[in-house]
Image (cartoon, rainbow, N blue to C red):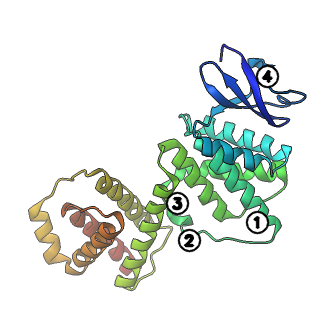
Amino acid sequence: MKESFFVEKALNNNVLIASHSQYKEVVLIGKGIAFGKKKGDEISTEAVEKMFLLQDEAEQEQYKQILAHVDEKFIEVMNDIMTHIGKSVQAPLNEHIHVALTDHIAFALKRIQQGIQISNPFLIETKTLYAKEYAIAEDVIDIIHQKLGVKLPEGEVAFIALHIHSAVTRKNLSEVNQHSQLIHQIIRVIEDSLKIEIDRESIYYMRLIRHLHFAIDRVKKGEKVEESVRLADILRNEYPMHYSLAWKVIKVMQQSLKVPVYDAEAVYLTMHLQRLTAKEESE
């Protein structure tokens, strides 16, 4: 940020669109940075607290529209939130989070004001899969509570965690959501087939969730795990019910992901299912 920025458009007192010889069009955030400024005015780098690029014109337009419907205090809080997330993950964030998370939290606050509650069916899965992002999201909820006086429900922690994970991994949020929904669907298939209710707090459940998550990642990347024919034969004979259920789960994954799943995945899934039910039966 050695060269000067020049005002293109002030969105409010603390946010403006500026031009730069190297970065082209950027969004600048800083306390009072846009106060009294007009198009063409120079902005000193000392006044800039946060800069991000929205190279996609549609995203930039969406961000402008969001800011037009929220107050200055909210933007200040979102700046604090983005700074906290950036420091916590210690990794570059996909700039899209500025649009997506600002929009999500603004809408969540509006729902609270209107007395509308939305449950999150993937809360436990999200907390298990993305523990670090979930902890950061809890901090975000606390920041909102402290600075805006609004306590968002626990379900929102999971939604925010998914936004953070999406920004860190640079995966599309819809892809991240697809993983959570697929795992949730698989867990229901397992519970229905085995006629059990899995303890969501158990280590066996957490291991199963993580295994499914990594299995989905492997399948999407086309990665093959080592297959032991002897082990497959043993499991098929010793635990026919679990082995059959593992293949049922494999078919659910194939239908959802639209890609083939290697046979070896059924072997490792069978072991997780057997451990899970052995634990349930021992209690």
Mark 1 or mark 3, whichever is nearer to me:
1
Q: Quickly name the residue at label 3.
A: 126
Mark-to-mark CA distance, 2 and 3:
10 Å
Q: Quickly name the residue at label 1.
A: 111
N-terminal of the pair, mark 2 or mark 3, is 2
Residue 30 on image: x %, y %: 79, 30
Disc 1 residue type (three-letter): Arg
Residue 281 on image: x %, y %: 36, 81
Q: Residue furthest bottom?
A: 195
Mark-to-mark CA distance, 2 and 4:
49 Å
Residue 138 on image: x %, y %: 66, 53
Task: Indicate which disc residue 218 carries.
Answer: none
Disc 4 residue type (three-letter): Gly
Residue 145 on image: x %, y %: 79, 53
Q: From what the image shows, is residue 15 above or below residue 166?
A: above
Q: Quickly name the residue at label 4.
A: 40
Badge 1 element:
helix
Badge 2 element:
loop
N-terminal of the pair, mark 1 or mark 2, is 1
Number of labels in the image equals 4
N-terminal of the pair, mark 3 or mark 4, is 4
